[in-house]
């Protein structure tokens, strides 16, 4: 039988991203150990942070696992309310599996009480799911923008599995298969799975409720619909950001199947502090000092 996350590890009321009450009291920190990515989303410009979980426009410093552990030690002293350590880029955690898994192992050993969290596009998380559960990573976000390859082909320019990038519906189908498999396997092991969907007007805004239904049936617990933030030098740079009416409709329709969270702060890959009070700029020099 596969390992399951220990139920006592769930202190979701202390996880700022999963609990509105907790978001005012408890802080999270992202360790930016994952620079590479294995896909190209049409809304992403790699000069900037991953928009899975990030506010575009500012690049992050990248740390090695050992540097990241030391940085976390200092930040935990500076901000004792840090309860959650997450890895969310600036690329994808599992395009950098050694760095991601080693960081999780080091943090689990040094900070046994810390809640661990990951955000990934899901393409290459599969082989690591057993160890993720063994390490008691309680919360994992998978960004799923489509469950139909025709729509996925509009969102992903290419998907790399092995040496060759797959394009069009072929790439999108692989992406969707891996993502849905990951949701089911994580949920089976007791991990709380959140689905992030980027709402792209005219591309997937009417499709996201379907994403909610399919992922709910596989065990997802929560959904976070994030409005597209058009970024320059991307195929979606000229799309308009979804307005409040569109976001309300998408959340309402998706919420019929999957609980919605609405206090997401689009955190940077090096975010630190309370959700609504990111302090990454304040501590940029501290982060920088660990890269030297
Ligand atoms: Fe960019 Fe993140 Fe998409 Fe990778 S998964 S292309 S880093 S938005
Ligand atoms: Fe986890 Fe995402 Fe919150 Fe970071 S922003 S702690 S990865 S849920």
Image (cartoon, grey):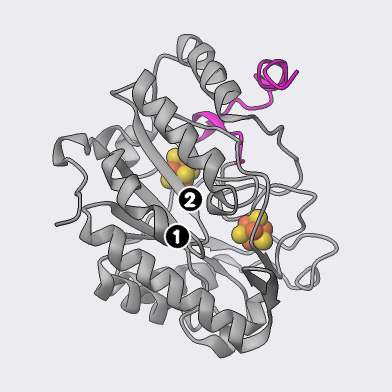
Pointer 1 residue Cβ closer than 8 Å to ligand 1: no
The answer to whether marks 2 and 1 mark residues whose Cβ atoms lie closer than 8 Å is yes
Would residue 16 be visible to someone looking at this image? no
Q: For the point 53% across and 53% down, which residue is it?
A: 94
* Relative side of 140 to 138, left or right: right
**Local crowd at mark 1 within 10 Å, few (<14), some, or many (≥20)?**
many
Query: Would residue 276 appear left or right of 91 to someone viewing this image?
Result: left
The residue lying toward the viewer, choosing from 202 and 92, is: 92
Give 232 or 142, whichever is nearer the viewer: 142
- Residue at 80% x, 50% y is 47
x 39%, y 82%: residue = 210
Residue 269 forms part of the magenta stretch: yes
Q: Does the residue labelled 2 lie within 8 Å of ligand 2?
A: yes
Can the viewer see residue 44? yes
Residue 65 position within the rendered picture, expressed as x and y whole percent measured from the top left: 56, 29
Q: Which mark is residue 162?
A: none
Q: In this view, does 266 lie to the left or right of 212?
A: right
On residue 119, the disc is 2
Q: Mark 1 points at which residue?
A: 142
Name the spot of residue 227 as percent of width and height, x first: 58, 63
Q: Quadrant of the N terminus?
A: bottom left
Which sits in the foreground, 254 or 165? 165
């Amino acid at each position: 039988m596969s390992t399951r996350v220990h139920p006592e590890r769930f202190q979701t009321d202390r996880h700022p991203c999963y609990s509105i009450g907790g978001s005012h009291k408890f802080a999270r920190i992202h360790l930016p150990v994952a620079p590479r990515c294995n896909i190209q989303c049409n809304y992403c410009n790699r000069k900037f942070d991953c928009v899975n979980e990030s506010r575009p426009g500012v690049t992050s410093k990248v740390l090695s696992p050992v540097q990241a552990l030391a940085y976390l030690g200092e930040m935990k002293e500076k901000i004792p309310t840090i309860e959650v350590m997450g890895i969310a880029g600036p690329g994808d955690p599992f395009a950098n599996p050694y760095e991601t898994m080693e960081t999780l192992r080091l943090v689990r050993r040094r900070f046994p009480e810390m809640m661990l969290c990951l955000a990934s596009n899901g393409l290459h998380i599969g082989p690591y799911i057993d160890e993720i559960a063994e390490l008691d990573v309680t919360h994992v976000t998978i960004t799923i923008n489509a469950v139909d390859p025709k729509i996925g082909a509009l969102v992903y320019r290419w998907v790399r599995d092995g040496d060759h990038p797959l394009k069009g519906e072929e790439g999108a189908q692989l992406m969707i298969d891996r993502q849905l498999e990951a949701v089911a396997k994580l949920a089976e092991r007791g991990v709380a799975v959140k689905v992030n969907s980027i709402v792209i007007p005219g591309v997937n805004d009417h499709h996201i409720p379907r994403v909610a239904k399919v992922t709910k049936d596989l065990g997802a617990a929560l959904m976070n619909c994030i409005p597209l933030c058009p970024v320059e030098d991307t195929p979606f740079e000229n799309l308009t950001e979804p307005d409040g009416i569109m976001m309300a409709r998408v959340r309402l329709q998706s919420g019929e199947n999957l609980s919605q969270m609405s206090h997401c702060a689009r955190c940077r890959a090096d975010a630190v502090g309370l959700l609504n009070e990111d302090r990454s700029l304040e501590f940029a020099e501290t982060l920088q000092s660990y890269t030297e």
